[in-house]
Image (cartoon, grey):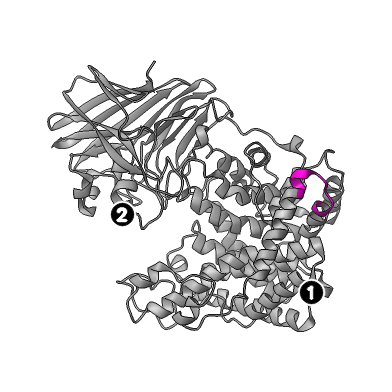
Amino acid sequence: MHRLSVPVFALLCATALSSSRGESADLAALPLQPVGALLDRAANDSDPAVAGIRETLIARARADAAKPVIRRARSIADIETSRVALKPTVANARPENRETFALAMFDADSGSALSTELPRLAAAYRLTGDTTLRDRLFAQLAELATWSPLQRPGWTLGGAGSKPLPPGGDGIWLGTGWHLRGIADALDLLPPDEIPVDLRTALDALLDREIATILADWRAQRPWFVKNPAPASNQWVLPVEGLVRASLHRGALREDAPPALCDAYDFGVHCLMQSLDSQGSLGEFREGLTYAAITVKGLLSSARAMARAGDDRALRHPFLANTGTWFAHHIQPGGFLVNAFDTLNGARDQLRIFDNVFAEIVVSTGNPHALQVQRTRGLTGNHTDALIAATIPGSLAQPPPLFAAYPTAARIVWRSSWDDSTATGVWIRGGEAGDRHDHQDRGHVNFIIGRQPLLIEAGALNYATPGFGVRFRGVPGHNVLQIGDPAPEQMTVAWLARAGQILDDAHRSAPFTVHRLDADGGDITIDASRCYAADVVTRWIRRVEWNGERMRVRDDVVLAQPDIVLFRWHTGEAPDAPVSQRKDGLDIGPVRLTWETDAALVTRVEAAPDATLRARTISEHAVAIVRSREPVTEFSLTTTVELAR
């Protein structure tokens, strides 16, 4: 059992944060403060920005209260009359699995909704004293107390080729963690003496059942992510969060805690630390921005609850200490984001989708770079932490560094300044064996000057997008090497495995070497030789040099057998942008591409789809394609990208 003697430190932190707005405060003290006390301070803050978020939160809570209580669905017919939508993927399940799968997904989706609604109702009640909000919260909690388990089995049955469930089911999942987070967060905000005794008794019994279920499923290795340990995955993290939060609410760190409860808590923390250790020490997450936003919430929720109870092991982990900076480094000039991996909300001007995540990072870790993003990018949010974050003096914010090289989920990010309208921005992908939800993007380069995107990637809208596996995840969606020149529509999975990059642990690694990375630009080399089939590509080395006006890319390729060597350059220009053919390159609108090589080249411009230039839709852009005229075994090409003057 790990207990810290922190009451004196916590008291000092409380004193530091109890100063009036505008006075010096310690960001590091935030996670140790009872969330109710922080919310009470926000209730009396007269700052217009705080008042605006406070009124938004209350209005959203009143809208939540007007919705019907989510009742447990027992059939697809029940789901169809519920406010939890029936998943479109239910139609893909085998007929004999369809209802079981639908009910499991209902549980997950209800948990996702209630993880936000329950604490928001509790916060709004605390802010207003409106018992209508409290009673609506109690009604939903009473309903949840009858659910057993919170997450039913069947969530692995979505595909037509899904295997039958084993006798014990497929185990705990996302709904486990989301529901328990919502319950724990709501209880944290309610005065204990206001919770009816029968409801408290029922909720305690629910927490005990869920603790037992999580432990039993873990020991039996029912979920795939336990059988094949995947501690970096959100599917591992959310049930672990549920175990930690439920154990703490049942008193695992009290002196008189039952040994079995202490053991459950320690096991949960052990699994949580495995998750933290699986990520990067510089704050990097292995699955890109969208999945980071899902998973980091569970890590923050656990770490903060532990720290408030006197156990700061998770909160002190370097991943959590630095992840706010990593999140901030996704912001590129011109409203763009680093949209590598399956970043499904990574199009231009979509940063606000992540506003609550930045608030949670600020309040849970005190990261000054995340606070700077909040204040300078107008991020607000409608959750409790958004309101608390708004009360923090802006003087405590610090601009993130302008550049970084992240070895985990390998990438380089660089900006010339934090002025989004004038800065130049660059990001470059390497690769690591542990990358997940990744694309065939090793060696990809992205280049933006002000609001002008010169080089982009295709991005990702959702998995149902036509051509997702080729046009968006595959080599055709990135500025990388391709072997051969078939149309993307002709590219099969087998073809991509030979002429594109291979997404398995043996082929994911593309290490980078930083020769220079400073305020003036950078010079890096990426070795993506191992990302292709060994009997196809022997060597591909890419060297990238850049400053605020120009990028120069040198590619050296050696093939095992003669073949066509092809590179794409996805521009931010419309497909009908004017194209000027030059002796040594192309101008596509204002984007100038210049090539240097001893080989004979063929160039063309095509339209390609993307989920980068416009939010929530598939748009099209012009892509320049340059290839060897004839099959070759060795090929060197230098490409310069800049704005035409």
Which quadrant of the structure image shows residue 400?
A: top right
**Can you say whether 460 is above or below 234 in the image?**
above
Q: Closest to the observer: 41 or 281?
A: 41
**Can you say whether 72 is above or below 609 in the image?**
below
Query: Is the residue marked by circle 2 packed among few (<14), some (14-19), or many (20+) residues within 10 Å?
Result: few
Residue at the spot of label 1? 256
Which quadrant of the structure image shows residue 264?
A: bottom right
Q: Closest to the observer: 600 or 7?
A: 600
| Mark 2 secondary-structure assignment | loop
Q: Give the spatial CA distance, label 2 vs label 1.
A: 58 Å
Q: Is residue 499 left or right of residue 329?
A: left
Residue at the spot of label 2? 466
| Mark 1 secondary-structure assignment | loop
Which residue shows up at 29% across the image and 43% down it?
475
Q: Which stretch appears magenta?
A: 42-51
Q: Is residue 586 left or right of residue 50?
A: left
Q: Give the residue type at disc 2.
A: Pro
**Mark 2 or mark 1: whose residue is earlier in sequence:** 1
Chief secondary structure of the magenta span? helix
Q: Is residue 203 left or right of residue 633?
A: right
Which quadrant of the structure image shows residue 610?
A: top left
Q: Give the residue type at disc 1.
A: Asp
Q: Is residue 84 left or right of residue 550?
A: right
The answer to whether residue 83 is visible is yes
Residue 454 in magenta stretch: no
Which residue shows up at 47% across the image and 71% down it?
105
How far across and how far down the image is residue 452, in percent? Answer: 45, 29
**In the rendered image, which quarter contains the N terminus?**
bottom right
**In the rendered image, which quarter contains the C terminus?**
top left
Task: Point out the frontmost of discs 2 and 1.
Answer: 2
Residue 47 in magenta stretch: yes
The answer to whether residue 252 is visible is no
